[in-house]
Amino acid sequence: MTKTLTDPVQLIYAGGTFGSYGRPLAPLPAEVFLPTLQTLLTEPDHAHYLPPVSWLDNTLIKDSSQLTPVDFVHFYQLILAAYTQGHRRFVLITGTDTLSYLGAFLAEAFAGSDICVAVTGSMRPLLDSEMLHTYSVDTHSDAWGNLNDALKLAAAGESGVKIAFGGESWPAQTVQKIHSHDLMAFTGHSRAAYPANSYIKHLPDARRQHWVEDQQEVSKSIDARAKQARIHALYCLPNDTEVISNQLQALLSQPPCGIILLGFGAGNVPYSADLAQALTLAHQHGHMVVCASQSPFGGVSDNYAAGSWQYEYHVIAGGRLTIPAIYARLLWLLLRYDSPTRRRQRWTNNVSQASITIKKR
């Protein structure tokens, strides 16, 4: 049975700057940090304006720069298990290096459900390292504010996966990190299409059970594929085209994988006959090649001949998707579907849904 909005928000701590402390800064052990955070959350000054919280036991706490596809699947399955038990509202605290990647992955994985997940982190630790004998909130840190915002976002219960950071929140697949150390480190936008438009506001119990059973049916295969899943990035630079052609050729002998081709501007990629042939061979070998822009905003288009030629050789246009969102979608398709044809069909179907939604708006 689904829990109500009066039930506690499920809080997951996964590591990162948020829980670092001391001189030099280092992550506190979970057995030290979590009771400290729990105490802070239940203090009278805080408890009266924050929703009740329940801790979801998590064994994977590490620097987010070390996360792998196997780790992404761990968090997906951890949340899925709690969702199966009727919990709907979650807050995940993680490191900022891969926060946008993990958030976008969870958005893809939980598409079609009515789950509510808020992902957050911080650029500065929650605890004040100037006070080494007592654990107290650093008033100059962004951690407490980000956590408060994420908890309130989850408490509202709106379906979907969102990222809360710097006083704002956005659908997870629109978010990217734009600053390496400023407190306003992330940005996103609200004109989100798939998977954000696939979440159900009120999902009947029978449909939720069907969705859960569908996920559980492929759980073991997802575990197995995560160990082999690979997403590569090929970055266009002002080099001879032989350079990127050789990089692509080197991937052809690998099992089917995802390849992000980072083009100039609106997705322009220097043409050569060798590169065109390599792209054809990549498709024949079951690889999915998606073109993205090196520019942080605007995405790709086929308006320029310098970019449109590649789409004749089975490259998929990344549209306005961010690099983390493209990574997340490629990874989920590799894990969820068993053949290159089905993966490509799912990508195409998702893009079609996104286009329809945007046109309606």
Image: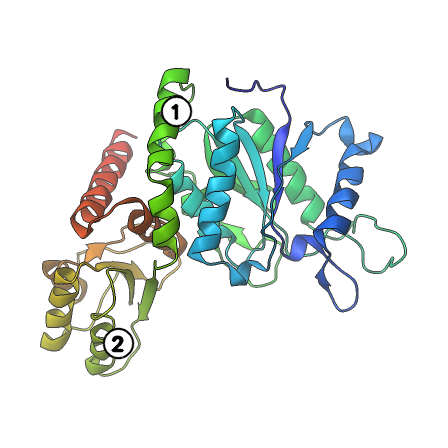
- Three-letter amino acid code at disc 1? Ile
The residue identified by callout 2 is 247
Q: Nearer the viewer, residue 197 or 204?
A: 204
**SS at badge 2:** helix
Residue 200 badge = 1
Q: Residue at x 55, y 58 (%)?
A: 64
Please state which of residues 36 and 209 is positioned toward the viewer in this rendering.
209
Occupied quadrant, residue 242: bottom left
| Residue occupying the point 60% across, 38% down | 150
Q: Position of residue 156 (x, y in %)?
A: 57, 25
Q: Is residue 331 above or below residue 78?
A: below
Q: Secondary structure at mark 1?
A: loop
In this picture, residue 314 sits left or right of residue 50: left
Q: Who comes first in sequence, dot 2 or dot 1?
A: 1
Q: Amino acid at mark 2?
A: Gln
Quarter where residue 285 is shown: bottom left
Q: Is residue 124 above or below residue 247?
A: above
Asked whether 156 or 212 is in front, the reply is 212
